[in-house]
């Protein structure tokens, strides 16, 4: 039998988690543009990003994150898998950089320390650790910018990008943000709430040698199952 004091402590943690989660789900978010480039990056990484970034702000004015997207992204015609929603992205492809001004959480609910992270694409395998997490298997894995020295268009194996992303969590699991199905159309960048109360950043990126990539990223929200 669990001692009463241990039960009360555990119950207290659960209650705090529930209240924080409810507050997060109830919040509304908006998109603001920032003309400040991402700072503290290598010249290779910095030159690969658009100078204009996007700030995700809640209705109290608190910044949840800032995101800088690639100027253009390579289509190597090497999709991560046949089931991938984003057939023009290869494993390890750099999509952008995200900055959290304070501690945040990824799609699995794992804590993410304040700081800057690269966002590299991966198609997460349906195994015992990830079965049922999402019907969409396209994710962006977070890597601390100081640990990411790879070329923006580098082809990485799944294990390589996961190993790099584990440095963001300090656990056996990579830090990740879920991607949505590609939007049908995008006139300009926006952040919108979906029917699962996830807030999704929608942007478009020029591709090389040609074309436009329409991109959806869950920037606020996590798996609840």
Image: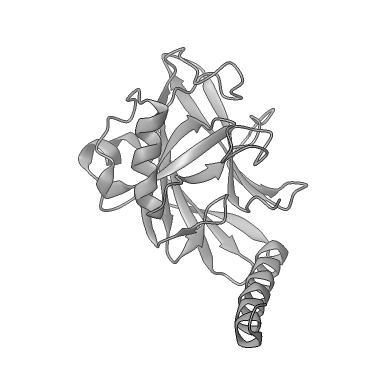
Front residue of this view, candidates 90 and 6:
6
Whole-percent x, y for residue 221 in the image? 63, 54
Q: Within the image, what quadrant is residue 216 found in? A: top right
* Residue occupying the far bottom of the picture: 5
Residue 183 lies left or right of residue 129; in this view the side is right
Q: How many marks?
A: 0
Front residue of this view, candidates 20 and 130 = 130
Q: Give percent across and percent down for residue 208.
A: 41, 18
- Is residue 143 shown to the viewer in this render? no
Question: Taking the image as drawn, is residue 144 in sight?
Answer: yes
Q: Depth check: 80 or 86 in front?
A: 80
In this picture, residue 190 sits left or right of residue 173: right
Q: Tell me the quarter of the picture where residue 61 sits.
A: bottom right
Name the one closer to the observer, 221 or 32.
221
Q: Quadrant of the N terminus?
A: bottom right
140 on left or right of 60: left
Q: Residue furthest right?
A: 195
Image point (54%, 69%), residue name = 62
* 82 vs 146: above or below: above
Q: How is the image coloured?
A: one colour
> Is 146 situated above or below 140?
below
Residue 75 in picture, x, y percent from top left: 44, 17
- Above or below, 203 against 214 in this view is below
Q: Residue at x 37, y 54 (%)?
A: 170
Looking at the image, which residue sits at the far front?
1
Image point 59% across, 37% down: which residue? 128
């Amino acid at each position: 039998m669990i001692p009463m004091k241990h039960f009360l402590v555990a119950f207290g943690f659960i209650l705090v988690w529930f209240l924080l989660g409810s507050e997060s789900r109830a919040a509304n978010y908006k998109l603001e543009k920032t003309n400040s480039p991402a700072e503290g990056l290598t010249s290779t990484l910095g030159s690969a990003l658009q100078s204009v970034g996007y700030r995700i702000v809640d209705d109290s004015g608190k910044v949840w994150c800032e995101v800088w997207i690639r100027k253009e992204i390579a289509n190597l015609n090497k999709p991560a898998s046949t089931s991938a929603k984003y057939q023009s992205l290869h494993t390890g492809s750099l999509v952008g950089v995200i900055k959290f001004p304070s501690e945040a959480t990824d799609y699995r609910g794992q804590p993410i320390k304040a700081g800057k992270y690269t966002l590299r694409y991966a198609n997460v395998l349906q195994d015992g650790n990830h079965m049922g997490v999402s019907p969409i298997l396209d994710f962006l894995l977070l890597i601390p910018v100081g640990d990411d020295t790879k070329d923006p268009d580098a082809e990485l194996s799944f294990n390589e990008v996961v190993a790099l992303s584990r440095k963001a969590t300090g656990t056996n699991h990579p830090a990740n943000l879920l991607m949505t199905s590609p939007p049908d159309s995008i006139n300009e960048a926006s952040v919108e709430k979906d029917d699962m109360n996830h807030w999704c950043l929608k942007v478009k990126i020029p591709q090389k040698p040609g074309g436009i990539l329409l991109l959806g990223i869950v920037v606020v929200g996590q798996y609840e199952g």
